[in-house]
Amino acid sequence: MAMKGAIVVDIEKCKGCGVCVANCPTETLALHKEVNGKGYNYSYMANPDTCTGCTNCAVVCPDTVITVYRVRV
C-alpha cells in the first residue's frame, strides 16, 4: 500500500528559512509568495499530490512548525 501525506504549517511561526523545501524529496513544498504577520514567506504544499508523508520537512524544521499526517491509500 502507498502512503499519502499532508502537512500543516503554523504559518505565523514559520520564518521561511527554506530548509524544509530543500529537504523535500518529492518537491512538494515551496515558499509562498505571500508573507505572514512577521513578514516572512512561509512554507506551504505547492504540490500536495506528491506528498508521501515522509516527515523529512518536520524533522529538519528548526522551529518545529510543521505537522505531518499520513494515511494509507
Image (cartoon, rainbow, N blue to C red):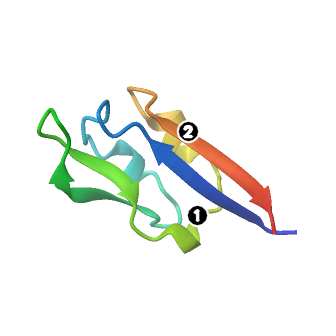
Furthest-right residue in this view: 1
Question: Going by the image, does 22 lie left or right of 2?
Answer: left
Q: Position of residue 37 (x, y in %)?
A: 17, 36
Which residue corresponds to the image point at 54% horizontal and 50% vertical from the top-left? Answer: 7
Res 34 quadrant in image: bottom left
Measured as percent of width and height from the top left, residue 27 is found at 45, 66
Using the image, determine if residue 59 lies above or below residue 44.
Answer: above
Q: Position of residue 56 (x, y in %)?
A: 55, 45
Q: Residue at x 14, y 32 (%)?
A: 38
- Under mark 1, the amino acid is Cys
Q: Where does label 1 land, which residue?
A: 51
Residue in the image at 77% along x and 57% along y? 71
Residue type for callout 2: Thr
**Residue 46 in picture, x, y percent from top left:** 39, 67
Instruction: Label 1, secondary structure: give it.
Output: loop
Distance in Å between CA atoms under marks 1 and 2 = 13 Å
